[in-house]
Amino acid sequence: MALTERVKQILSWYPSDNPGTLTNLARLMNHGTLAGTGKFVILPVDQGFEHGPARSFQPNVPGYDPEYHAQLAIESGCNAYAAPLGFLEAIAGKMAGEIPLILKLNNSDSLAKVDQPMSALTATVKDAVRLGCVAIGYTIYPGSGARNQQYQDLRDLIAEAKDAGLPTVLWAYPRGSGLSKDGETAIDVVAYAAQIASQLGAHVIKVKPPKEHIEQAEAKKVYEKYNIPVKTLSDRVRHVVQSAFNGKRIVIFSGGEAKDTASLLDEVKQIQQGGGFGSIMGRNAFQRPKAEALKLLSDVMGIFRG
């Protein structure tokens, strides 16, 4: 389809990128139900690696099969499907051209309990090109004692991906011994993570919906002095998007742990109202029976269409 004015506007925010990278970013925005709107609903399925198969797939047994998730992304009209190497290798050839693919280049598991989390590199940019992907994905943990290595690895991967014409989708999840559990989703910390992700060169930034809590004492003084609105989720989403280059970077929000449909749709409405670019929704979609998941994703896309 021809590029809409909104898609052209978003592409203009990345003036240093080469035509290949911009073309693949446009492909993400020009696919599925939300094509041309500049909004995103992406299905990510890395939970089997991150949380284990039973926790991830037993609530909806067909999810043990990699093809189930790709087909769900296709049938629901998602912008893209994101997964680790194994899941994409299982479906990329069979479903070539049917759905934009994002290869998650690093992953971790929940078997080791560590104070300073860091995901392992589990795939390469060459794998992403071989599988016909339109982007790479990567996770950073701002707040981890291992963050410097993560940032340095990401720098090299982004440079290599750009040479191959691929944009980067960055999971920015604050985590580490220096943060409380509430601090991982505190508004000041999530906004900081969005800024870090922007500075590191991410094209699309994935963060968790922020809570009203403020973690950093020095940041709290500023939030109070300037009366930064953080009472509602839409206020907080607006501030996170502002923190990503004043809204000139694509910021999408995770669905998080499974929740009831009404709560989930209310959260999506507030993300939309706050200027969020979309949702990247895994467990809340694929852990439901397929018909229910398709209805949910359709409703979510309807909200983002306005």
Image (tube, rainbow, N blue to C red):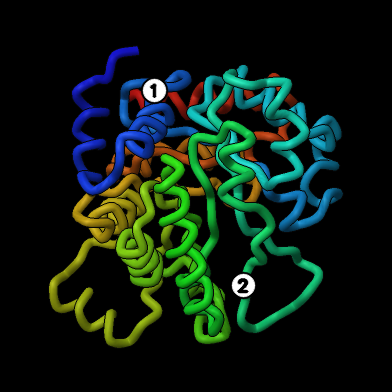
- Write the residue at 65% across / 27% down: 293
Q: Taking the image as drawn, is residue 187 in sight?
A: no
Q: Taking the image as drawn, is residue 91 in sight?
A: yes
Q: Nearer the viewer, residue 172 or 227?
A: 172
Q: Nearer the viewer, residue 26 or 217?
A: 26
Q: Is residue 176 left or right of residue 152?
A: right
Q: Do callouts 2 and 1 mark residues in contact (Cβ within 8 Å)?
A: no
Where is residue 125 shown, x and y percent of the image? 56, 49
Q: Is residue 34 left or right of residue 177?
A: left
Give how far apart the Cα atoms at labels 2 and 1 are: 33 Å
Q: Residue furthest left?
A: 226
- Write the residue at 49% across / 58% down: 157
- Write the residue at 26% across / 28% down: 7
Q: Is residue 287 above or below residue 5?
A: below
Q: Nearer the viewer, residue 108 or 255?
A: 108
Give me the disc on residue 30. 1
The quarter of the picture where residue 118 lies is bottom right
Amino acid tagged 1: Asn
Q: Nearer the viewer, residue 52 or 204?
A: 204
- Tell me the quadrant of the picture where the N terminus can be found: top left
The quarter of the picture where residue 213 lies is bottom left
Mark 2: few/some/many CA within 10 Å (<14, 14-19, 20+): many
Where is residue 281 shown, x and y percent of the image? 56, 40
Q: Is residue 172 above or below residue 152?
A: above
Q: Is residue 225 left or right of residue 278?
A: left
Q: Secondary structure at mark 2?
A: loop
Q: Which residue is mark 2?
A: 118
Q: Secondary structure at mark 1?
A: loop
